[in-house]
Image (spheres, rainbow, N blue to C red):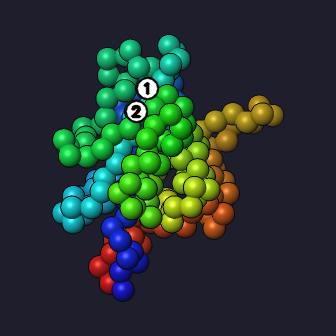
Amino acid sequence: MNLFVNPPALLVLDVQDGFDDPYWGKRNNLEAEENILQLLTEWRRRKWPVIYSQHLSLLPHSPLYYKNTNGPKFKEIIRPKANEKVFQKNVNSAFIGTELETYLRDQQIKSVIITGLSTQHCVSTTTRMSGNLGFDTYLIEDAIAAFELIDHKGIKRSAEDVQTFELATLHHEFATIMTTANIMTKLTN
């Protein structure tokens, strides 16, 4: 049985060239973009809603700085098509400072599938807000990626650990965590 009564929106968050910059450190899940592409291909085939966010940082040192030539560009593998909605933002949540919530409600979209970069920034923040706003939210763990970081105690945390902790805090509270294979199976049964 199909998991969804109405077509869910596929959210592709900030999959931009600037995330390939060494500035971010080591990354996990190098297959994230391929998994996003698999979902994107299915959504396009079904003519279901595809929505992008594009981070345009106001910080000049950021690889996503809005005045940079390449950093803010979408990665070639998942560039939006003309009929796909793009919301530009300069904070972590795709809901803040954009018309995303209004658009979803106007289109009567009740479920969202979240993919993108990076787990500890825009993905986590958008997922939390999506759940809090009442959307049926699914986060695709192999279609997102985290970066290593140094915590408040000066301890380096691996990208894999960051991903694991973020998913643990989001599951059940804000979203249902699934894989690309899980969601594809749910769409066809």
Q: CA distance from mark 1 to mark 2?
A: 7 Å
- Residue 83 marker: none
Q: Where, by quadrant of the figure, is residue 18 drawn? A: top left
Residue at 36% in and 86% down: 1
Residue at 64% in and 36% down: 149
Res 71 seen here: yes
Q: Amino acid at mark 2?
A: Gln
Q: Nearer the viewer, residue 27 or 33?
A: 33
Q: Of callouts 1 and 2, which one flags the residue occurring earlier in the amino acid sequence?
A: 1
Relative to 97, is 72 on the left or the right?
left
Q: Are marks 1 and 2 in contact (CB under 8 Å)?
A: yes
For label 1, count other residues whose C-alpha is less than 10 Å away and answer few (under 14), some (14-19) or many (20+): many
Res 15 seen here: no
Q: Secondary structure at mark 2?
A: strand
For label 2, count other residues whose C-alpha is less than 10 Å away and answer few (under 14), some (14-19) or many (20+): some
Q: Amino acid at mark 1?
A: Leu
The residue tagged 1 is 56
